[in-house]
Image (spheres, rainbow, N blue to C red):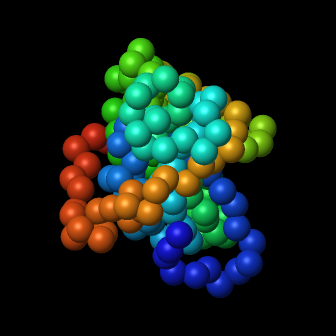
Amino acid sequence: MGKNQSSTDLTEKAIFAAGCFWSKQYFFSQLPGVIATQTGYTGGSKTQPSYHDVLSKTTGHAEAVEVIFDPERIGFEQLTKFFFEIHDPTIDRRDKGGQYRSAIFFLNEKQQAIAQLLIDRLAQNGILATTTLELAQIFWPAEERHQQYCELRNLKPHNAYKARFD
């Protein structure tokens, strides 16, 4: 994990899945208030899955990003809105093993409620998200070669999608 250290020791965690985790980690790591990000796998049945295991589409894991943040600088609601802005949540990717599904792995009832509220707001704006809300399970860190993939290769992903929260 890496990113600038916060001025406070109080941190929170969020876990998001939205397709390939490389660009999503890059985008989240750029946000003020985000202290650290890590790519990994969650939501499946295999203990300590590898990238190869997840690619097999038999484990049920999603490629995800764990975000450690300073809630005094950025809140879970802001992170979740941003999550909806960096991918198209209307594309259902659950049918092929779910590796690239849109999912929010909530850690408590407050996160679940906020995520559901935002999904409902998207629906009110005509955006029918296929995003699932799943109770967070063990987050298995991805192999080192998948951490900070874009930064280490000097890649600057482009984000063409923007959700609406009017």
Q: Nearer the viewer, residue 74 or 136?
A: 136
Residue 9 place in picture, x, y as percent: 74, 78
Residue 81 can be seen in this image: no
Residue 25 place in picture, x, y as percent: 42, 57
Residue drawn at x 53%, y 69% as measured from the top left: 1
Q: Report which quarter residue 47 is drawn in.
A: top right
- In the rendered image, the residue lying farthest to the top is 95
Q: Nearer the viewer, residue 90 or 56?
A: 56
Q: Nearer the viewer, residue 73 or 28?
A: 28
Residue 84 place in picture, x, y as percent: 43, 40
Q: Report which quarter residue 54 is drawn in.
A: top left
Q: Quadrant of the C terminus?
A: top left
Query: Is residue 110 depicted above or below 60 in this figure?
Result: below
Residue 151 can be seen in this image: yes
Residue drawn at x 46%, y 56% as measured from the top left: 143
Query: Is residue 56 depicted above or below 48 in this figure?
Result: above
Image-based side of 22 in relation to 94, left or right: left
Residue drawn at x 41%, y 39% as measured from the top left: 52
Residue 139 place in picture, x, y as percent: 63, 47
Count numbered badges in the picture. 0
Query: Is residue 85 depicted above or below 123 in this figure?
Result: below
